[in-house]
Amino acid sequence: MELFGTVESWHEKLYLHLSKPFFGRAFYLTKKIFIYNEIVLFFFQKNMISKNMTVGEIVAKNVAFAEIFEKYGIDFCCGGDVSFIEICEKNNLDAEKIIAELQNLPEKQSADHDFENFDLGDLADYIVDVHHTFVRENIPRIDEYLNKICRVHGENHPELFGVLENYEAVREELLAHMPKEENVLFPYIHRLVDAEKNNIAPAKPPFGTVKNPIRMMEMEHDNAGDATKNIRNLTNNFTLPEDACNSYRITFELLENFEKDLHVHIHLENNILFPKAIALEEKLWNA
């Protein structure tokens, strides 16, 4: 199995981190006995990645990898179930170059949260508090700016009307989508977590199994993902025309940030929350 780095390279990184007080404290036992081998095992296993892993699984290891995948146009959210090596071969990408970038990701860009090990209820709450809030806060701003540049620049740049059409499609999809998660799916995931903590079987929900709303959510994710891809294509990767004004620039920045947030949002659900919720439900029902 080919890995992003060797045991030796991770040892080198570990020694560098040991010189930093926060890292030492993080792995000091209560009796202040430092066990080096256990740290090496934890540090290496957590970052061990195979080229045959799906891109969704790779970003689940460290969400900071998303920025590098974005740069190369690698779909890690809706298309997160495809292997890294398959995507590289299909799109003529240099797998070794991308691996090197993943390995050498600056520490300041490392993930703030270990989403892979989040409590599922906490992860659902995080998605609502961070990503659903982001969508609701940014929609009015994008509405204002995008409609403005369509009025002012639409005659010379008719592609803007296609951008508006696709943006309105993803906006309406998300505004209908988020309440379903907040009022139906996520509360049930909380009940699954509580059932596991209390060692009891959860009551069967009216929708039969968690797989059913998840299937619907994933279909809606695909629709939103397709619309954002169309926007990126229509804007030539958010490239500003020569006659772009400040409002044009702000609009493209808002749209690109909206796309990036949506990619992480969908990744957290499709590649972490949903599969783990399905596995937890099956475990509890089969206990």
Image (cartoon, grey):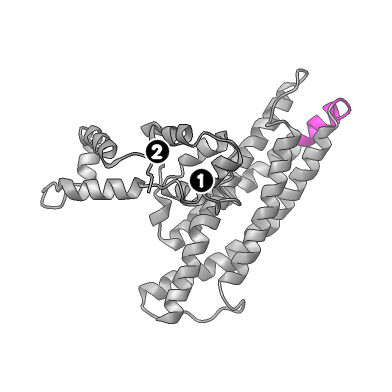
Residue at image position (73%, 32%) is 235
The answer to whether mark 2 and mark 1 are in CB contact below 8 A is: no
Looking at the rendered structure, the kind of residue marked 2 is Ser
Residue at image position (52%, 50%) is 83
User: Element type at marker 2?
Assistant: loop
| Image location (x, y in percent) of residue 56 | 51, 50
Q: Is residue 20 above or below residue 222?
A: above
**Boundaries of the magenta span:** 146-156
Task: Determine if residue 1 is in view.
Answer: yes
Picture mark count: 2
Q: Which mark is residue 110?
A: 2
Which of the marked residues, 2 or 1, is nearer the chain's N terminus? Answer: 1
Mark 1 sits on what residue? 84
Quarter of the image that includes the C terminus: bottom left
Q: Nearer the viewer, mark 2 or mark 1?
A: 1
Q: Residues within 10 Å of mark 2 (few under 14, many from 20)?
A: few
| Image location (x, y in percent) of residue 23 | 24, 40
Q: Residues within 10 Å of mark 1 (few under 14, many from 20)?
A: many
* In magenta segment, residue 169: no
| Image location (x, y in percent) of residue 177 | 66, 58
* In magenta segment, residue 154: yes
- Gap between marks 2 and 1 measured at Cα: 20 Å
Looking at the rendered structure, the kind of residue marked 1 is Phe
Query: Would residue 228 appear left or right of 134 to someone viewing this image?
Result: right
